[in-house]
Image (cartoon, rainbow, N blue to C red):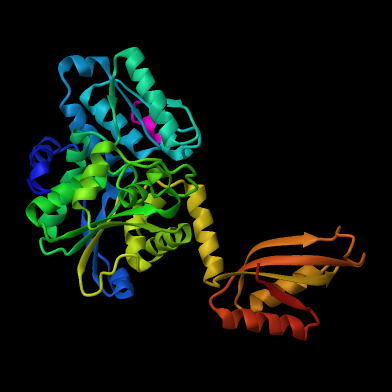
Amino acid sequence: MDAMGKYNRIFLKILDARDVLHGIKHVTRLDHTSTFSRITGGDVYLKLENLQKTGSFKVRGAAYAMSQLTDKEKEAGVIAASAGNHAQGTAYAATRLGIKSTIVMPVFSPVAKIQATEGYGANVLLHGAVFDDALVHARELAEKTGATFLHPFNDENVIAGQGTIGLEILNECPDVDVIAVPVGGGGLVSGIGIAVKEQRPEVEVYGVEAASAASMKASIEAGRIVNVQNLDTVCDGIAVKRPGRITFKIAKDLLAGVVAVEELEVTRTLFMLLERAKIVVEPAGCVGLAAYQHGKIDIKGKKAVAVLSGGNIDMSFLSRVVEKELFRLGRSVRVRGSILDRVGSMNNVLSIVAQSGVSVIEINQDRFDPDIPPNRAELEMILEVPDDKAVKRMLKMLSEKGLAFRVVED
């Protein structure tokens, strides 16, 4: 039996899921991006699962899996473990189907995801530092209570629900050459892989992980499931220590490869998506596009789809990404200099800065450092600048007034 023949049963479930999920999930758009097409040399499309109900693809698998429960199982309720997106998808689908849900989430899950999960009607329990800790606890609770444990990825029905994305991609882009899919435990890439390869075996489907949590990549390279211990990544949605038994086998059989992207590659893609495409996505959701942008998957001359798997990003984290990128790009700068510690000195500096066409974002004044003369103060300003010429013009204008300021690079 060839690789695809093994998964015909799951493919039939994917077709069934497409019908079952009608009206429960959105058929999300497939948008062309000229920006990333130009950067990569390919013809790039974005599958906008960040606009899915609950903000990620997870509602598909959770809803289909629960639709397959018996009446008795539905009465007993469901228990799931999640870093956030499976939690929200399960909570939403359970509430819609009239099923009681309990979700175990890691203690350090983003507050926005915890609150959203509770808002969808679930009882949330916080346990463990990472997803895998929450998973063990959720299984124990299911055994004690008799509720059905709903695995986030190592479940054929969950995989089938996620696979409906593959059907939608081929429906809108039948001549696609490459698809890049974020990988945590592997449910999404397994479902898409089966849905696509069953119909177009020549399409290359790649899994993409965060380099600091690349358990699927490590497992495939080792030829067996291995654990990754230190999950030091901003991609909390795919921070999984080990892939599932089912998903590992599917990925090994069907994927063209699994690649890993670095943290700064992810956040730079996230920033560009926000600024150029006006799309808000969480770090885990844009790793596939990051792999294209940073050359981990060569798509020159090819039609490529990147699945943006989720958009549930913590706003404080998003603000930090934006701030860091603005500094990296030179559109925000930090300047420092010394002024006389007397009335009017700061106003004089600010007047010159305003005349130069530069905007002040933040000001800090230090007059207590023992190394600063008693009659002077150290002034640091964070500025928003249109370009490097504006900064040089401002520094020159300050210098002409006897004020020595410099750009702080670190």
Q: Is residue 13 above or below residue 33?
A: above
Task: Where is residue 121? Give x, y as percent.
Answer: 34, 26
Q: Is residue 118 magenta?
A: yes
Residue at 21% across / 75% down in the picture?
Answer: 301
Work out whether residue 27 can be spotted: no
Indicate the quadrant containing the C terminus: top left, top right, bottom left or bottom right.
bottom right
Q: Quadrant location of residue 54?
A: top left
Is residue 25 depicted above or below 256 in this figure?
A: above
Q: Residue at x 55, y 73 (%)?
A: 330
Q: Position of residue 193 (x, y in %)?
A: 18, 50
Using the rendered view, name the quadrant where residue 367 is placed.
Answer: bottom right
Q: Nearer the viewer, residue 262 or 318?
A: 262
The answer to whether residue 130 is magenta is no
Question: Residue at point 19% right, 51% down?
Answer: 254
- Is 62 positioned to the left or the right of 219 in the image? left
| Picture quarter with the N terminus | top left
For the question of whether residue 372 can be seen, the reply is yes
Q: Residue at x 21, y 45 (%)?
A: 250
Please provide percent x and percent y for residue 370. Answer: 90, 60
> Is residue 214 left or right of 401 when viewed as pictured?
left
Q: Nearer the viewer, residue 54 or 153?
A: 153
- Which residues are the magenta region? 116-122
Q: Indicate left or right for 112 with 333 as reference.
A: left
Name, please, the residue furthest toward the front. 223
Q: Nearer the viewer, residue 200 or 337?
A: 200
Q: How many marks?
A: 0
Q: Position of residue 124 (x, y in %)?
A: 41, 26
